[in-house]
Image (cartoon, rainbow, N blue to C red):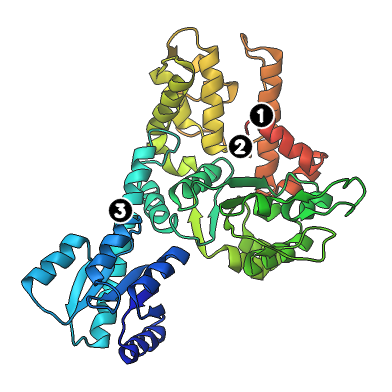
Amino acid sequence: MKVLVIEDETAFRQVLEAQMAKDGIEAIGVGLGEEGLRELEKQDFDVVVTDLRLPDRDGIDIIKEMHTRGYGTPVLLMTAYASVSTAVAALQAGAADYLIKPVRVPDLIRRVKQIYEMEQLKRENTLLRRIVQQDNKKYWFPDTPAGLRIKQVLAKVSNTDMTVLITGESGTGKGMTARLIHSLSSRAERPLVQVNCGAIPETLVESELFGHVKGAFTGADKAKDGLFVGAHGGTLFLDEIGELPLNMQVKLLHAIEDKVVRPLGSTRDRPIDVRIVAATNRNLEQMVQDGTFRMDLFYRLNIFQVLMPSLREQREALPSVIEFMLRRFFQTVGKDIRIAPDAMAAMQAYSWPGNLRELENVLERAILMADGDTLQARDLPAVLAGQAGTEQAPSSSNSMSMEYVPGRNFRDQVAAFERQLILQAIEEAAGDRRAAARNLGVGLSTLYRKLEELNA
């Protein structure tokens, strides 16, 4: 917590600053109202404590001037002139509260903490309402206990600069959650830069993240800013952070901790102001034990973790997410589609190893296959079409079968098989996409390209 103290009694101000520091509060003290306003121009504060009578201006005038300039910082007013009119004037001007001098320092600090906590609660409630309002637009979180917990967590962390680690299986909405965190933050008007750490060739990772100077390597015919610089003032979303090469992890750690980057080939550091959001479908703790992920980087990223549940863990939410996706599809193409009971039964019986991403892909393809305005079970991919009436979908780890489906063209059926093959390889590699690519006999960048092409 950071507090601005505007008090012309030097001894009292110094005692207050010292006691606040002992309580873990960063306090900056000034003796004049104009000095306080200048400090508010330079930096953000959580609470302002000001005396009513100051040598250059009135404390109530300071509150009014703060509102005129758009500062929403709550103000605690101290006054030695206790009267009903003074109290009313202070509250009407927008003060959060007032205290009558002489003030006991512990009482003042306790009230500052209460005001701060109340403001935090207001912000969380405001963000929670914004999350709920945006559910019907670009973002969806299920009306389940797990979904509610995610909303509450995001309301607490979004409007901070805290590093966030989003974990969960592929397709559970980690990217969506990262975008929502950025949109709810004070950095929303600044860039959100996303990078897939596994999709960049290992030899180019440093240049992509930190940039390079002209002549840094063969082909570097001009200087280039890296993604950190591109995200300056905003958010850098490091997707698939578990795929980052080990030798780059220490450089990333230094960039995050020191808030500077050094372009490849340069001898000078460049300051950066970036909020980090990372995501992975890997078990980073296990990777730390295996020596494939740095422990210090893991702890630096894992300050605040958001766990995205799989779709099979929230089967009761499936109808609502299908409705959300169909509504969004209608807004895009204007085609209103209903779900027939047999199609809904088939989808509820399926295990959805690809989670939300797989569901969206299946719905879009099925809508294109549907003849009318009702999606039938026969419009679903072969792996789902036979699920209606069954109690449990086959696990994606079962041996694959691919059969000819009348009415579907060759390209769609081959793509469906490729997608099923890749998802099974990833699952059998426990989410390790590098190992899955090796087992499939393809390069990691090829695997990522295929996942993107197949929307898997």
For the point 49% across and 7% down, the residue is 371
Q: Residue furthest front?
A: 56
Q: Position of residue 143 (x, y in %)?
A: 34, 42
Mark 3–mark 2 Cα distance, whole angstroms, equals 40 Å
**Tag 1 secondary structure:** loop
Q: Residue at x 62, y 57 (%)?
A: 283
Q: Is residue 4 above or below residue 63?
A: below
Judge from the rendering whether residue 189 lies leftward or rightward of residue 440; answer left or right: left
The C terminus: image quadrant: top right
Left or right of 7, for residue 217: right
- In the picture of the structure, the residue carrying the numbered disc 2 is 396
Q: Mark 2: which secondary structure?
A: loop
Determine which quarter of the picture holds residue 290: bottom right
Q: CA distance from mark 1 to mark 2?
A: 17 Å
Mark 3 nearby-residue class (10 Å; few <14, some 14–19, many ≥20): some
| In this view, 20 is above or below 443 | below
User: Residue 236: image x %, image y %?
Assistant: 60, 52
Question: What is the tally of numbered marks visible in this picture?
Answer: 3
Residue highlighted by disc 3: 125
Outermost residue on the right side: it is: 218
Residue 346 picture location, percent across and down: 47, 25
**Disc 3 residue type (three-letter):** Asn
The residue labelled by disc 1 is: 454
